[in-house]
Amino acid sequence: MRCKCEDFRVGSFFHLYNHVIDDLLLFYEDQDYDFFLLTISQQFDKIPASVFAYCLMPNHYHFLLRQDSDIKIYRAFNYAFISYAKYYNKKYGRKGRIFRSPLQHIEVKDQTYLIQLCKYIHLNPVYANLVKEPDEWIYSNYKEWIKKRTGKLFANEVHEYYFPDPVKYIKFISSV
């Protein structure tokens, strides 16, 4: 789905995601993940958003967030990925775009879907057989949900409302 400006309103929740083109990887090494996390974090300082769940995968990413200002949240991703594409293309001797399509998004209007989406995002590395347990994957904010790490890309409102005890979220994640 192409980004539609009218979808992006203050207080709206979104699942934002995208895949890299062809058979490339989006992140080849830890430095790539770190560069992107720093870049997107800097953008969220300028364009306020609450990040509830995220996961960076080798060939794609997922973010569940809420737009917290009149500035359209997709702009943060546009700026971050322009910066990341320049870094990526220079580092890996490429030219051109790195994503299969424009930023993909789904507006999240249902609380049940919101919680299931957190689970889906945090289990992505497990589903991809990159790790056995979600807390083994450092490029998500799952560890913030289970209170094993304090990170900047984590708004705890949803977490505190539904899972104030980390054990409840661990059980929820483990349930089929």
Image: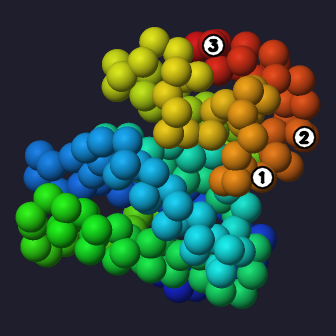
Q: Where is residue 167 shown, x and y percent of the image?
A: 81, 16
Q: CA distance from mark 2 to mark 3?
A: 19 Å
First along the sequence among labels 1 and 3: 1
Closer to the eye: label 1 or 2: 1
In the drawing, what numbered circle is on residue 155?
A: 1
Which amino acid type corresponds to the residue marked 3 in the rendered image?
Ser
- The relative height of residue 140 versus residue 157 in the rendered view (above or below) is above
Image-based side of 164 in relation to 95, left or right: right
- The relative height of residue 23 versus residue 90 in the rendered view (above or below) is above
- The relative height of residue 27 versus residue 128 in the rendered view (above or below) is below
Q: Where is residue 131 shown, x and y percent of the image?
A: 42, 18
Question: Which quadrant would the C terminus be assigned to in this image?
Answer: top right
Q: CA distance from mark 1 to mark 3?
A: 22 Å
Image-based side of 119 in relation to 133, left or right: right
Considering the numbered disc 1 on the image, is that residue within a helix, a strand or a loop? Answer: loop
First along the sequence among labels 1 and 2: 1
In the drawing, what numbered circle is on residue 174?
A: 3
Q: Where is residue 15 shown, x and y percent of the image?
A: 55, 56
Which residue sits at x=73%, y=27%? 148
Which residue, given by chain and number where applicable, does mark 2 sit on?
161
Q: Are marks 1 and 2 in contact (CB under 8 Å)?
A: no
Q: Nearer the viewer, residue 6 or 142?
A: 142
Which residue sits at x=76%, y=46%? 111
Which residue sits at x=59%, y=22%? 135
Closer to the eye: label 1 or 3: 1
Image-based side of 28 in relation to 134, left or right: left
Q: Where is residue 44 shown, x and y percent of the image?
A: 64, 71
Which residue sits at x=13%, y=75%? 96
Q: Nearer the viewer, residue 81 or 175?
A: 81
